[in-house]
Amino acid sequence: MNPASATTAEMLEAALAEHRAGRLPQAEQLYRTVLAAEPNNADALHLLGMLAHACRQPQHAVDLIGRAIAINPHVAAFHCDLAIVLRDVRRYDEALNSVKRALASDRAAEGPLFVLASILHARGEFEAAAEACERLLSMHPRHVAGHLLAGAAALRLVRVRQAITLAERAISIEPQNASAHWNLAWALLLDGQLERGWEEFEWRLRPGGRIPPRPDLRDKPLWRRQDISAATILLYCEGGFGDALQFVRYVPMVTQRAARVLLECPAALFDLFKFVHGAERVIVRGRPLPDFDVACPLQSLPYNFRTTLETIPADVPYLAAEEQLIRQWSDRLPRGFKIGLAWAGSNNPADRRSRTLATFAPLAAAADVYFISLQIGDDARQAKSPPAGVTLLDMSGRLTDFAQTAALMANLDLIITVETSVAHLAGALAKPVWVLVPFGSDFRWMLGRTDSPWYPTMRLFRQSDPQDWHTPVGQMAAALRELRAGAN
């Protein structure tokens, strides 16, 4: 296309085609050519704003779409897309105002209705989000994304059977929709329907799924229950540290199926995993891989072994700390009853698992207890100002990897934590561990249980109300007082 001879409309159409094809630099150049000729072209400003959003330039996107709205305030799509940008940078009040302007011209428009529901969901108003999805689906019953969002809200509200139904409806409309199968997997696993749940969970690895294929593994088949008795298999970590710690338990079982077993893991896990029974060799992720025939992420092992509630391999410990490190930590710690404490997971401010150290202040009522901080990252700074009455030793500077954390845990009498990798490590080491579980929890903690079928030494303290942490922490404090009273 020759911009010199094309009309503005033709250039805009060509820019949009490039935009949709993902050729963003070419699209941007054409949008800017249009704007050089017509600085007040609202459509070009709007689309360039959405391109800026795709390039993670949110303020630039807001400015451009805002200029489009100033020129033509009656286009619902402008307000709707501005709401999307604002939602994605957590400016929820502004996003709601924008999407309501979009709905003012057509209260049945499916795009703005869906965006409204998504904003409510993002700000944690799950009941309102569910109602908005219900309104959307009543008018647009084949809106797959609406079913998925309604299912996500149902899960947060612990309406698991409803979430299953919504996911199944989405699949009936789009059988190959990997996100719908992911939602169904999550709901089934939460409901304890493990074998069917693991089947659906495998959709995360398919085109459009949550886990993109690794370029370095594309020429190798995945293990999907085929015979591997003559094969060398590479097991690798796919999700977070907690996932790796939970599912590395399957490695000894794989040795009964494969000729050789290799294990790849992040550097932070290497010194802990290098002694995993059955792994012939452990490789740090990012380093050259030896020859192998077939690959399998650790999170697919429950599928390959058709794991049910009754067949979870729950023999613990299946991980161990090095004796030399255990002795080194013993020399650093006081004598007496010692409790490891972790209060935050990821650095994401929206992570509902994470608490502040102050959340655990009621634990100070237990006498003659030393608390040892197991917290790492930015949240570890809170250990410098513990709640009144809490004797807290900050060891974060020495917790350089999971082998160090495991050795420290070996010297502790109890671990108290939110649902993060610390919980999985303590369970894998067979240490007594109490976990604070949020309402609408991760699937592995299931529904209503105070124990875990994955970790025999674990006790769960659950929220019964998403706004109330006082009750489960109070229950934890009471249990701690009872534990200490029994010891005296």
Image (cartoon, helix red, strand yellow):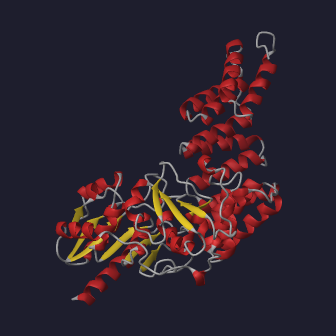
Q: In this view, does 57 lie to the left or right of 179?
A: left
Name the foreground residue: 44 vs 335.
Answer: 335
- Using the rendered view, name the quadrant where residue 474 is placed: bottom left
Q: Which residue is drawn at 61% across and 31% down?
A: 52
Q: Quadrant of residue 174?
A: bottom right
Kindly identify the residue that appears in the image at 24 percent across and 57 percent down: 385
Please count the marks in the image.
Answer: 0
Residue 391, located in which quarter of the rendered image? bottom left
Q: Which x, y percent locates residue 433? A: 38, 76
Residue 158 shows in this picture: no
Percent x, y of residue 104: 73, 42
Q: Is residue 322 left or right of residue 86?
A: left
Q: Can residue 334 be seen in this view?
A: yes
Quadrant (top left, top right, bottom left, bottom right) of the C terminus = bottom left
At x 53%, y 79%, the residue is 313
| Residue projecting furthest to the top | 4
- Which quarter shows the N terminus? top right
Q: Where is residue 173 in the image (x, y as percent from the top left)?
A: 82, 59
Q: Is residue 273 above or below residue 314?
A: above
Q: Position of residue 206 (x, y in %)?
A: 70, 56
For the point 50% across and 61% down, the residue is 263
